[in-house]
Image (cartoon, rainbow, N blue to C red):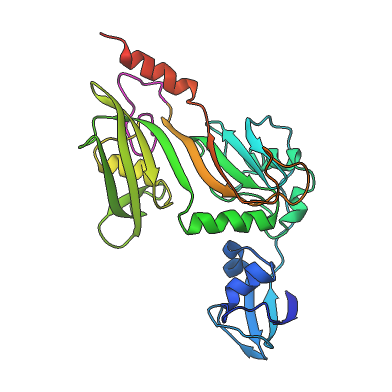
Amino acid sequence: MTSYEHDVGEDAQGGDRLDKYISDKLRLFSRSQIKRRVVRVLVNGLESKLSRKIKTGDHLEILYTEPPSPDVRPEAIELDILYEDANVAVINKPQGMVVHPGKGRHSGTLVNALLFRCEGMAARFPEEYLRPGIVHRLDKDTSGVIITARNIETHNFLARQFSKRRIRKTYLAIVKGSPPHSRGIIETQIKRNPYHRKRFTACQAGGRVAVTAYKVLRSFPGYSFIALRPNTGRTHQLRVHALHMGCPVLGDPIYSRRDRVFPEATLMLHAYKLEVVLPPLHSGEPSNGVYGQFRRKTFKAPVPSRFKEILGRLARPG
């Protein structure tokens, strides 16, 4: 157990919550780490909840656990870099690559590749020993654009945009069947399937709200090529919502059966576009002539060959 003491100064604005102050001002942990790492917090000698509002002059004593020894090593894995600067690296993740280590997997992940490419990165994320730089995820079999942070300040900057739903993401999918309309919005709640631990299910109550907008780009007999824009970020949200409207994603090993026409199809889901605001560059060379300013960027990951092959076969008459 480790103890950290601090006297709150005038940087506590408007009665900050304790957990927000610890992550944003003290930068001891990211928001996701606080509940796992912090054991007790004493404010002026009295044990307090993380939701407590603090004020200038308060004395904090934070008791927390040290993370286990890191077992994630840099690996020379080639990455398809769409963009990078001193703060971020934007990657076109290939299908089949796991984003970060976990559950016995400690090699071959995007994190292993990032640690090799970005020297000293692990030291900048001491509490995120399994997920340094990872702001959001893509499923193993989902390909496409993913943004990663090279320092904790950028991580927090991007994480706030995700939590406030200011980042716009567009996915492409080939689905079985035809959606009910040419465009629409799917709004349900999503919860874990009680009978299948790897599956999630759409429901009207008892889960977390999930909202997805969709648009049909092209229709074929028995299949559709669609764009999906999630307004929330639930696990398997797009795959669950596609199934909910009667159009499971082609090649989905969890939410769809093996297809008779395309038995070789893998998950036909691709993160195509990401619209995000990047933090200012305070060191190094300016990017595109912009230095020290917030920069709104749009990144696109090219449509993968597996999509082009199946769309080409669907477009052929007969």
The residue under the point 47% across, 36% down is 271
* Residue 137 shows in the view: no
Up/down of 47 relative to 75, above or below: below
- Can you name the residue that lies furthest to the front here? 289
Q: Nearer the viewer, residue 306 or 54?
A: 54
Q: Viewed as shown, does residue 255 lie left or right of 144? A: left
Q: Position of residue 141 (x, y in %)?
A: 48, 35
Q: Position of residue 313 (x, y in %)?
A: 35, 14
* Residue 177 shows in the view: yes
Q: Is residue 101 magenta?
A: no
Give the quarter of the image for residue 206.
Answer: bottom left
Query: Can you say which quadrant of the picture contains the N terminus?
Result: bottom right
Q: Nearer the viewer, residue 55 or 308?
A: 55
Up/down of 176 relative to 71, above or below: above
The residue under the point 32% across, 50% down is 201
Q: Position of residue 213 (x, y in %)?
A: 33, 44
Q: Nearer the viewer, residue 131 or 232?
A: 232
Which segment is the magenta one?
250-265
Instruction: Name the chief secondary structure element in magenta.
Output: loop
